[in-house]
Amino acid sequence: MQPRYCERINPANGETEKRLRLPPLPGNSDPQWGWIGISDDVLLAASTPIALNLEGGKREKGQETSKIAKRVATSDMSIALVAFQRESGKPLWSRSASLAFQHDAIVMGSGKIFCIDGLRRFQNDLLKNQGIFIAAAPTLYALDAKTGETIWQKPVDDHADQLAYSKDRDVLLHFSLESEGVAGENSSKLKAYDGSDGVLLWEKADQLKSRPVLCGGQAFLDGAMIDIATGESAVWKDPIEKAERKFNLDSIWDDTIATSDLLFSGNGECIDLQARDGLLLPRLNAIEDIEGNIVGGGVLAVATESRIHAFGSRTGLPDWRYQLFQGLTSSVQRVGINFGAAGDRGDTDGMLWLEKPAINGRDPGLEVLIENENARFYREPSDSDNKLGWIGSSGVINPGAIEIKLDYSPLSAEKVYRVKLFFQTPPSQKESYTTFDVLVQGEKVLSNLDVAWQAGGAVKLLVKEFAEIEAEESIRIELVPHRGEPFISGIALER
């Protein structure tokens, strides 16, 4: 986009395919482009950017925008909207503002355009300080994207001056941001309207620090996730305790963008909203100094100071992640422990496997004690044909006894678990002969276990399952050597 034209460029070769110019406006034969937006087959332009003209002394109440504004090359508001057919460039309609269209209060989707015609609170205050009084109040409009006709409208009765729209739920958010050093940008409410008729769905006395990010019918607001249709906090199931937890992230999540099912932060971290497993993806390729992200056409483009990295937004996502939930408060219902793993991971049955020790991500607080201080962890690429083969690609050698705390509430009670033990011969022992006993809760369940022989090969995963294991506060598993050093890759517990 240039001041006097907008170009459509072929992304394959960089050549200009079409150049669009704005139609003349009354009293302005040479309008300039101030902002553009695209939705479906409509391209929308904000025509003729303006800035407040605070020169020339006092003016009378009720003066028009043309008397209190001046044309400028760039600004955050314009005096008209112009819609084009996206492919042909044919003008569809235009609409002049009573006061001004604020660029960050224009959003599009589902065949509609939402916009605010009016000045912001601090702009009105600046004018009042010059003795200029504006009679007209800001108005929120919903327009038909193809015709420009008004679908609904309502006055803006507080200081909220920005918009965001969810196509998934047809919900419009009306809000304001905290503004440092700008007077009068306070006391606004966060409101949600039904996009079809403008009916108020909910409101909160909240002012946001950053623009909301909308994804999959949810709104990401300053680190918290809410259901955009109800305003209620989004609740996810803690995969370990099966308890409901409010979804919340810390303040590192700035400059967040989203697709319909992936949420990307400005520092390269990502949540897979489709999985809804509460797992946070590790930083994409350990990229540093990220300047910005752009998502489109299924591709995430990450810009740094020196280059641009491209990732498939669903393909190529890392398997190893780490979970968001911290601080267990009741009893463990279902969990997997993967010794020496590269991160946390969900399996095809929905069980969350935690890395132990927790090195690459956040530790939810599951206490796992390995009694032998000389135990050694290992990890190698998985070459197993088992669907859970990645569990066997890492493990711990010579752990002695392993004790897993199960109850984190003040009152504990006896529980019954199904216990699965996962074994795969470590790389250092593929040429050696190792046997050991396995005890669960002090009772021998496996004698002279030869993992490679029972699994059918040194690179095969062996799974042993034991039902009806009674436990109160913890489960204790012991590996007692007969020959060589015993090893284990993972432990799964389920009530």
Image (spheres, rainbow, N blue to C red):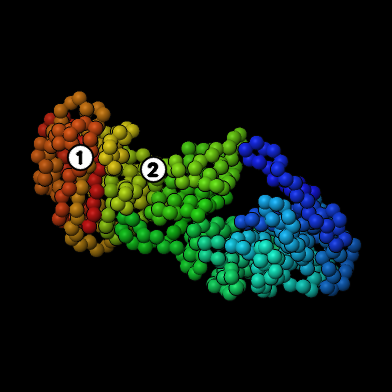
- Residue 467 located left or right of residue 155: left
Q: Residue furthest top?
A: 431
Q: Residues within 10 Å of mark 2 (few under 14, many from 20)?
A: some
Residue 323 placement (x, y as % from top left): 39, 50
Element under label 1? strand
Element under label 2? loop
What amino acid is at disc 2?
Answer: Asp
What amino acid is at disc 1?
Answer: Leu
Q: Report the front residue among 143 and 445.
A: 143
Is there any visible trace of residue 47 in the rendered image? yes
Which numbered marker is on residue 462? 1
Q: Report the front residue among 149 and 411.
A: 149
- Residue 14 located left or right of residue 349: right
Q: Residue furthest right?
A: 56
Residue 473 placement (x, y as % from top left): 21, 56
Quarter of image, res 319? top left
The residue identified by callout 2 is 319
The mark tally for this picture is 2
The residue at 48%/37% (across/down) is 286
Residue 45 placement (x, y as % from top left): 72, 56
The residue at 67%/37% (across/down) is 14
- Residue 112 located left or right of residue 258: right
